[in-house]
Image (cartoon, rainbow, N blue to C red):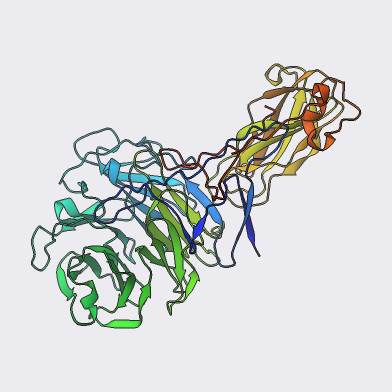
Amino acid sequence: MLDYRISTRLVLARNHGRRSFAGEIMHGEEGALFGRRVVAGILALCLGGCVLGVVQTALADGEPSLFWRSPVDGQSGEEAGRMVSPSGLAVDPATGNLYVTDQGNSRVVEFNAWGEFIRAWGWGVTDGANGFQICSSATGCQAGTSGAGPGQFDRKLGGGGIAVAPDGSVYVGDPDNFRVEKFSSSGSFLLEFGEEGMGPGQFKPGTYLDNLTVGPDGTVYLGEKNRIQAFEPDGSFKEEILFEGELEALKDREFRDLASDEDGNLYATVVGLGEIVKFDSTGRRVAPGSFPLEKPRNITFDKKGNLYTTENFQEIVEFDKDANLLIAPGDGFGDVDLSLVGLAASGACGIEGSDIFSLASNGVVSSFVTAFGPPPDPAICPPPVKPPTIIRLFAAVVTPASAIVKAEINPHFWPDTIYHVEYGTGKCSEGGCTSREPVADLLLSGEVVDKTITTEGVTLSGLQPGTEYHFRFIAESGGGGPVVGSEKSFTTSREGLIAHCPNDAYRAGPAAFLADCRAYEMVSPVDKGGGEIFTLFNSLNERSSLNQSSIT
């Protein structure tokens, strides 16, 4: 079945199956993409319920659909559940909980399988005290302090990796302190290992991405230039894998990403090598040997053993075990217009298949985790008990005797979310909304998602011309409620519809009541010179788009 996503964006031009972009801001040798060139813009003036640049996009079979985003508004910050310049993502295979290295706030942030914030840890994250702390929504959270203390982080160069062991232990790379720190699944500091140097058990200076992984036997692997080191769970040095022989292609290149599969095989990427290299713990390549991709970043695996990676920080690409492409570069899967800096997959919580999680950020403005795939089994991992949120409401169509009103509601994973409208000529807050539509509540969508959904239009009939009406939406679900939304108003059109005009085809909706046979006109560029049309981006690398009625 195809999953359709409606977007107000204009179609991006393709160049040999890949997006065209420019205006890149570089980080390190190659770097994340934080900007795109504005090629063309469209300015439209439209009244009467018209929609600008609507494109219906079908997700190909096999591409998981959007499940949730956390935080929902995607904004960076130091409060509980927010992040600043995050740089790594890992998932607990047993619980489905996610762990993020919140680099800008000097802490680790934990979410559950529903994207709900659980806790964060680091130094001073609760009240700024000079010591290790664990904060939650109840205590409140703030940015931690950087340093070299136990459980503290100092990640000026970025990266360093984060990984979860089979027993739930969390390992966090702290490259500027030349160490790896180990925590319990609930954030308690356990131990640290490593020091600066070139010898066994010592770490070299460098800028790393996800260079840390844990094998199915609990062995901790850390990749750096020209080698991968292996450690026991207690931090003692075990062995090293040198980049020679079958791994010669990795030699003398800046190390980037490291991952391990359920069979204990390792996967690595380095700067300037257009492939992900697969090998065993002895350094011998394992079939298929490599997964070719121009600029692979981040690596994870689903329950089937399929490999997911990000192409140049921009979109998610999928291979099967034999390196056959399942989701190709240029398909745009996972593209959220920010740099993708982390990737993880989980089949925990009774999920039918696997969920794919991506971490996106453009620094101090936007940072969030996005989940794609099916929801957890609520009997195993119950969803958050939270009532629906009524985000916004508006009148989509207004005539002398009727109106169609809509709202945007987030069900917060509860598929039984229902709603209705109260309206009247007085203010709802003062008891003036005495009418209700419809008599029986309407089902929002039946979807298990944590995203804003636009309701079906609710028709309010029998209205008086030229009269102001107030209205509000009421919603509830198994997560709570009823929730009363804010109120808005509209004024019905006055009588006076012109019987016939030569341009009737252009006088739909409110335009039918304009005097002298006038009509609304959409304005667009006079001459595009045969060029493609790109959506307009602002300076924060976010699409400049607007999706709302022009009536209210």
Q: Quadrant of the N terminus?
A: bottom right
As rendered, which of 495 and 346 lies closer to the eye? 495
Q: Position of residue 420 (x, y in %)?
A: 73, 36
Residue 210 left/right relative to 534? left
Residue sitting at x 22%, y 66%:
223
As rendered, which of 15 and 50 lies closer to the eye? 15
As rendered, which of 125 and 500 lies closer to the eye? 500
Residue 253 vertical placement versus 551 (above, below): below
- Asked if residue 398 can be seen in this view, the reply is no
Residue 76 left/right relative to 220? right
Q: Position of residue 439 (x, y in %)?
A: 82, 36
Residue sitting at x 59%, y 64%:
60
Residue 354 vertical placement versus 488 (above, below): below
Residue sitting at x 53%, y 60%:
373
As rendered, which of 264 and 297 lies closer to the eye? 297
Choose top left, top right, bottom left or bottom right for residue 412: top right
Choose top left, top right, bottom left or bottom right for residue 38: top left
Q: Position of residue 288 (x, y in %)?
A: 37, 81
